[in-house]
Amino acid sequence: MNAHYPDELASAPLLEIDGASVMRGDRLILDHFSLRIDAGEHTAILGANGAGKSTLVRLITRELYPLARKDGTSSMHVFGRDRWHVSDLRGLLGIVSPSLQDDCTSDATLEVSEAVLSSFFAARRLGLDHRVTAAMRERADEAIAHAGATHLLGRRMASLSTGEARRVLIARALVHRPRALLLDEPCAGLDMASRRRFLESLRGLARSGTTLLLVTHHIEEVLPEIERVVLLRDGRVLRQGDKADVLTSEALGDAFGMPVRVQRNGDYYNAAVM
Ligand SMILES: Nc1ncnc2c1ncn2[C@@H]1O[C@H](COP(=O)(O)OP(=O)(O)OP(=O)(O)O)[C@@H](O)[C@H]1O
């Protein structure tokens, strides 16, 4: 269901970070951090608490910026460009994050359809100057159906369960038919069954051409379609590469600072602390 974009965007890497340094408060969290993710390369970014995952997500979503370089060049490109209007970037990169979910569910009167339609205007609510067209409504209905949220229409976001609200956020991200989805801890708060159903719906998206960038600390969420894994520790890439090479007991033990045993379970992996 992807839209068409200029040729330069079609083949540009989703993400190129080349020696970026990021401060939070007075601490250097990412120090000369580099990472490249190619178009179409479904990737999981894994790491323990405090490894730097949220910092990386905020860097990608432009909520944080890298320190300026002396030579004025940019250490970060998204879809080949170093400058983006946030609203243009949203059309290419859908985002589902805990902070976005908090925003939407803490608004007592926001309804499901408005939470999705307002995404066309890079807003959280529809304003008087937002002209919703029939085509937008059609796209919103399509995205809501795709996310399995049609039965939630008419409900208020604040009344939804965590899993239900997550589906609406996926619809909000999908309404632009983005090339990629950045999912930050998308299974947080979901029960076992909802988690499995949700992961299966992500598999469908991955197969239909939406690149998945999944950020998590649970290796059980690494979908079969995800071939590449990046392990973070202390704001650095500890290991990256093919899933089978990275999801080992030794590498996971290093990343989480504790002996773990990794097991393959069909097309999925799981890990237990030893
Ligand atoms: N505003 C801030 N000021 C100072 N340090 C911060 C700030 N925000 C985050 N940090 C530090 O940055 C490091 C990385 O944090 P980050 O939130 O990116 O990790 P994470 O991998 O997302 O962790 P978690 O899985 O717990 O969410 C941590 O050591 C954290 O304490």
Image: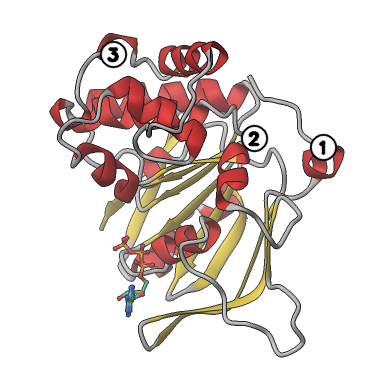
For the residues labelled 3 and 2, say whether their Cβ atoms are less than 8 Å apart: no
Q: Which residue is mark 3?
A: 153
Q: Is mark 1 within 8 Å of ligand 1?
A: no
Nearer to the camera, 110 or 9: 110
Q: Residue 255: x and y, percent?
A: 41, 66
In terms of depth relative to the viewer, which is nearer, 247 or 130?
A: 130
In the rendered image, is residue 171 in sight? yes
Say if 235 sits above or below 116 in the image. Answer: below
Marks 1/3 in contact by CB < 8 Å: the verdict is no
Residue under numbered circle 2: 179
- Occupied quadrant, residue 4: top right
Can see residue 199? no
Residue at label 1?
6
Q: Crowding near pointer 2: few (<14 within 10 Å), some, many (20+)?
A: many
How far apart, in angstroms, are the residues tagged by discs 3 and 2? 25 Å
The color scheme shown is secondary structure
Residue 30 located left or right of residue 73 = left
Q: Quadrant of the N terminus?
A: top right
* Residue at the far front in the pictured view: 128
Residue at horizontal 34 percent and vertical 45 percent from the top = 100
Q: Earlier in the sequence, mark 3 or mark 2?
A: 3
Callout 1 crowding tier (Cα within 10 Å): few <14, some 14–19, many ≥20: few
- Residue 60 is tagged as none
Residue 62: percent from left, percent from top:
52, 60
In the image, residue 6 lies at what x, y percent? 82, 37
Ligand 1 quarter of the rendering: bottom left
Ligand 1 is within 8 Å of the C-beta of the residue at disc 3: no
Q: Secondary structure at mark 2?
A: loop
Q: Residue at x 45, y 12 (%)?
A: 141
